[in-house]
Image: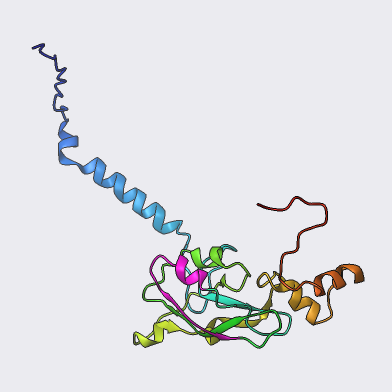
Amino acid sequence: MVAMAINVKVLERPRLSFWEKLYIPQVLKGLMITIRHITNHQPITVKYPEEVKALPENYRGLHVMPADDEGEIRCVACKLCEIACPTQAISIVSEPADDYGIERRPKVYNIDFMRCVFCGFCVEACPCDALRMGMKYELSSYNRAGLVHTKEVFFDPNVKSDAPRDNANFLYKMGKGEILDSPEEISKIMGLDGTYSRKPGSPQAT
């Protein structure tokens, strides 16, 4: 068995002078630093609520549900945000939608802020830009029920979005007469019946 050598460094106690043993110079030096900070004090606190601190653009506060071009909630109740939430703070109950090209809409959309950690995963998971992180941070409540917010709290008709709501966005736009494609393309789309037909000349599948 080979013995391993260990290097040991011995530290000697520093020798202090008489004045250093009294610690008077150190105390005076600390007092001078304190006095300098008092005389040249620059406050960095904000007198809330009279003053509101400017928040960065990427601040993650209370959620916001944008409106579509008709002033309605854009959410299609796909529940991807509910699945992506790591704390299971989102609960959604869907119902059939009357909009052309939109199958479902949220009947109940609640977020429990006793669980929410404002990670933003729900916003990233949303495929139709129906949920964003807002700038509001005053979420205090006197009871637990006040921390469960509904879609009426999140919905902001002043926030607009033109992102497609789902795969039926083309049909949604066509039903409103806002499609910009050529008449030939429109007739081709309207002639689709959902069945697959083999192109002439293509080999038949075996």
Q: Residue furthest front?
A: 206
Give the residue displayed 84% in from the left and 69% down from the top: 188
Find residue 38 and report its image quarter. bottom left
Colouring used for the render: rainbow
Q: Residue furthest left?
A: 1
Find out whether residue 86 is within the magenta segment: yes
Q: Nearer the viewer, residue 28 or 126?
A: 126
Find out whether residue 61 is within the magenta segment: no
Q: Position of residue 190 (x, y in %)?
A: 81, 75
Give the residue displayed 60% in from the left and 67% down from the top: 127
Q: Relative to 129, is 32 on the left or the right?
A: left
Q: Position of residue 20 (x, y in %)?
A: 19, 35
Q: Residue furthest right?
A: 183
Q: Position of residue 98 (x, y in %)?
A: 66, 88
Q: Nearer the viewer, residue 57 or 203?
A: 203
Q: Which residues are magenta?
A: 79-96
The answer to whether residue 120 is seen in the rendering is no
The answer to whether residue 148 is seen in the rendering is yes
Give the residue displayed 82% in from the left and 73% down from the top: 191
The quadrant of the image that shows the N terminus is: top left
Count all numbered tags in the image, as a single digit.
0
Check the image and report above or below for 97 versus 78.
below
Give the residue displayed 85% in from the left and 72% down from the top: 186
Q: Nearer the viewer, residue 175 or 75?
A: 175
Q: Nearer the viewer, residue 157 or 176?
A: 176
Q: Relative to 112, is 193 on the left or the right?
A: right
Q: Residue furthest top?
A: 2
Check the image and report above or below for 24 versus 7.
below
